[in-house]
Image: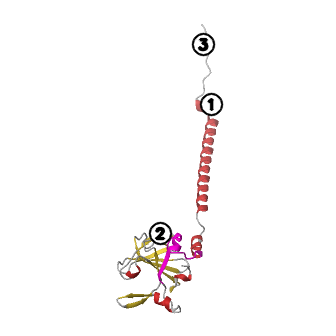
């Protein structure tokens, strides 16, 4: 009778010599892949943050630029040759004719002009910010004419009166040259028709806008 030869017993998979090294090697590769992916994501986010930071203005740069601005016309410069100054700023040191032109009369009462009344071809025109700044007040008064008041970084304040179609509100930050309203006529000073009454205060004191601008 032929004896059956015994087959060598096959070890379980987990007992094979190569099994655990393969498992550990695979886990190590996964850990390396996760760490590499995290580093790539972190570096990408860091690079994005640096780019965004580089695009931001340096602290104080905006305010410094605003402080260095010079006052410009409260209308588009392309119309400067068509501008008429209907009433001057009242200056006690000016000649008699200029002082007379700077007096406003209502109900036989004389009032000294605290700014200049500007007209362009007797038609409504776009009123723009003479400097970058913040709108601090908007007064609505159909009789005397609506008024926008703006403060500026260099200590000046500008006032734009006899305006309609107002595009700003208190708290708005406005850039120089940005339209804020449209000129109009008012009942308090009807003799000048459609105009802008423009005032400038320097450190809280009313000054002649012509001190800064050539009309």
Judged from the image, the secondary structure of the residue bearing numbered disc 2 is strand
Q: Is residue 24 above or below residue 67?
A: above
Q: Label 3: which residue?
A: 4
Which residue is at 61% across, 49% downward?
40
The image's mark for residue 112 is: none
* Mark earlier in primary sequence (3, 2): 3
The image's mark for residue 179 is: 2
Mark 1 in CB contact with mark 2 (< 8 angstroms) = no
* Mark earlier in primary sequence (1, 2): 1
Q: Position of residue 61 (x, y in %)?
A: 60, 70
Which residue is at 61% across, 59% downward?
50
Q: Is residue 70 visible?
A: yes
Q: Label 1: which residue?
A: 16
- Which residues, given as a range, are shown in magenta? 68-87
Pick the front one: 102 or 199: 102
Judged from the image, the secondary structure of the residue bearing numbered disc 1 is loop
Q: Place residue 59 in its image quadrant.
A: bottom right
Q: Position of residue 36 (x, y in %)?
A: 62, 47
Q: Is residue 120 above or below residue 55?
A: below
Q: Is residue 64 above or below residue 97?
A: above
């Amino acid at each position: 009778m032929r004896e059956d030869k015994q087959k060598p017993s096959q070890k379980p998979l987990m007992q094979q010599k190569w099994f655990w090294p393969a498992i550990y090697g695979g886990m190590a590769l996964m850990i390396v892949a996760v760490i590499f992916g995290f580093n790539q994501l972190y570096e990408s986010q860091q690079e994005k943050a640096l780019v965004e930071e580089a695009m931001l203005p340096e602290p104080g740069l905006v305010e410094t630029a605003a402080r260095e601005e010079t006052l410009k016309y409260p209308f588009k410069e392309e119309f400067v040759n068509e501008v008429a100054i209907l009433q001057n700023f009242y200056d006690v040191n000016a000649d008699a004719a200029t002082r007379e032109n700077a007096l406003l009369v209502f109900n036989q009462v004389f009032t000294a002009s605290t700014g200049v009344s500007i007209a362009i071809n007797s038609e409504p025109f776009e009123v723009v910010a003479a400097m970058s700044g913040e709108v601090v007040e908007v007064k609505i008064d159909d009789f005397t004419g609506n008024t926008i008041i703006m403060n500026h970084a260099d200590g000046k304040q500008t006032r734009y009166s006899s305006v309609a179609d107002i595009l700003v509100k208190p708290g708005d930050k406005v850039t120089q040259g940005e339209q804020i309203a449209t000129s109009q006529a008012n009942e308090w000073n009807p003799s000048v028709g459609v105009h802008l009454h423009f005032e400038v205060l320097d450190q809280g004191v009313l000054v002649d806008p012509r001190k800064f601008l050539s009309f």
